[in-house]
Amino acid sequence: MKNILVLLFVTVCSTAILATSALCDDDWGDAPEGSVAYPSTGVIGGFPTCQNVPINFYITHGALPPQWTFFGPQEDYEFEGNAGQCPNFPPYDADECFQDGDAGLMFPEPYTISGGTVVPCPNFTGYPMQDTCKTAVWGIDVDIEVHHSGNPADPGYINVLFDWNQNGVWGDTVFCSSGSTPIPVPEHVLINFHLPAGYSGPLSGLGPPSFIVGTNRGYVWARFMVSESKVILPWDGHGVYEGGESEDYLIEINETPQNDPDFGDAPEGEPAYPSMGVTGQFPTCVNLGQSGWIEHAPGSRAWFGPMVDGEADGNAGNCAVTPPFPPYDMDECFGDNDAGLIMPPSYTIVGNVVVPCSTSCTGRLGAPCSTAVWGRNVDILINNGSDLDMFVNVLVDWNHDGVWGGQDSCRAVPVPEHVLVDFLIPPGFNQPLSALNPPSFVIGPDTGYVWTRFTITSTPVGADWNGEGQFEDGESEDYLLWVSESCAGTGKGYEPPQFYLGRTNPNPFANKTVVSYEIPYDQRVRLAVYDALGRQVKLLFDTVKPAGQHEAFWDGTDAQGHRVTPGIYFLRMESAGSAMTQRLVLIK
């Protein structure tokens, strides 16, 4: 009976042009139907969007509130859709730019069409989709916020379409080649993917399968659709659904320039150890080339930290193509938010003097001739966003001679400077290196500063590597570290960074309480509320957060948005294997 009523209601609304009732303001698509979809080619969109322009049918979600499945922070009820042929609206209302706060696309960044021209949305920084015929990974290349607050007995389903061949309709298949073998690439990339009730967060958190990007670079229209019923295959984006939401976006397939090549940062032709008078001859700068150089091509899909650092100059001043450049641009201090070193903190050189990157005790790699353990003495964040195995190599200049590749000894035991050799990183890995349990290594015999290179590449380099090479993919990051049992000059031991969970305010509270927290590096953080019996009441978030200070709040509701009973609850934050808990008191 419920289904009959809803279908009847949708039919009534479909025959009415006037949207005088909020209940008739149901959700439609946004992709152009009867309007220009790709201005550069003049292709008119035939995407199923508008009920009154049925070039290729239409899509609509029932108007009876509440809707249990939707994208973004709230559902977008819209009678008009986005294309201009839907009544009384200009060709584009910029809905794909989320101007009304409803859409949930996290990345890649969308465009819109204004005055017959494709233009980026506000606050645009140029994040495109993965390149053609490459594998797109959820959480790395694409992601969207999704919610299901309904009955556990009523699952949701997610479907995603991309117009790979840019012909203005969905549902086709294009072909990428692998040698002489054509590989079919469907435009329907996610098919009836299960969305469990109670889930609220990035779609990537549910582990959807990766997919291959189509053959054409440039702009493509994409449809993300969540509903309380499956689509019937083959699907071209149309349908009448009792619940859910559709959001369409114009995105770019790797057309935006991908920065400069990535070079090294260790000094070449500059002081490496000022107190010793040693000039670095590390292979860093392509235009200096005293001992070769290292270079990674633009557009890398594997890197350290939250993003790849494209830099034409490297770090040493003599690498600069156009002088003057300072001898060090503080890249080893993560000044441009690209580097991924977790521990130990690093040093840099300012005015020919070694200085710590942090004002606090900046720690040590470990005592001479001791064993360094990944996750305890040293760690770095790695992101392999490719569909290939990658390889990590680590070099440490134990003997302070300004080059890598030799070895020292501890009690007659050889200690190589190439401490991690061609360690495999699987596709899609995005965690600290320690999560893969790389082998520990012996630290060199001398106390003092050491230049260290971390490199990730798509090709192995071999055990006798000295840090140079030209690579099609990957990144290199160099750091000046300290070999000792204590912080330099302080005698204090170094503790790995931990997140900090501040106090909630107010507490006790009646309507909403706010909690501040701080994390030292980009990492996955989970924050949830539990009752006095240890049962989860509401997951506030479980996602990667950038380093820095943040705030979150709880409004006293459960996962379904219902007000919970007054009493004692617990706020628990988990990250990097650690957890902190706070007691909350909810009053009437």
Image: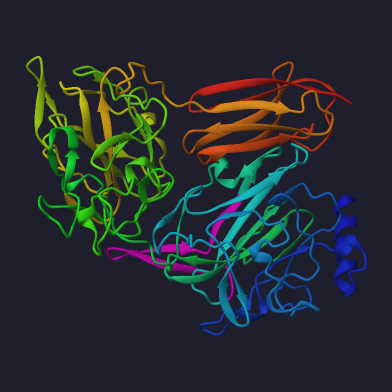
Horizontally, residue 353 falls left or right of residue 133, namely: left
At 63% from the left edge and 31% from the top edge, which residue is drawn? 527
Whether residue 133 is situated above or below residue 548 in the rendered picture: below
Q: Identify the residue at the far front of this view.
A: 351
Q: Considering depth in this image, is 268 or 380 the residue closer to the camera?
A: 268
Q: Position of residue 36 (x, y in %)?
A: 62, 81
Q: Position of residue 167 (x, y in %)?
A: 54, 77
Q: Considering depth in this image, is 181 or 43 the residue closer to the camera?
A: 43
| In magenta segment, residue 44 | no
Horizontally, residue 537 falls left or right of residue 110, namely: right
At 33% from the left edge and 16% from the top edge, which residue is drawn? 491
Find residue 343 and report its image quarter: top left
At 74% from the left edge and 73% from the top edge, which residue is drawn? 50
At 51% from the left edge and 71% from the top edge, which residue is drawn? 219
| In magenta segment, residue 178 | yes
Q: Position of residue 443 (x, y in %)?
A: 20, 23
Q: Identify the residue at the far right of this view.
A: 20
Would you say the magenta stretch is mainly helix, strand or loop? strand
Residue 175 appears anywhere in the view: yes
Question: Number of callouts in the render?
Answer: 0
Q: Over which residues does the magenta segment extend? A: 168-192
Find residue 470 and report its image quarter: bottom left
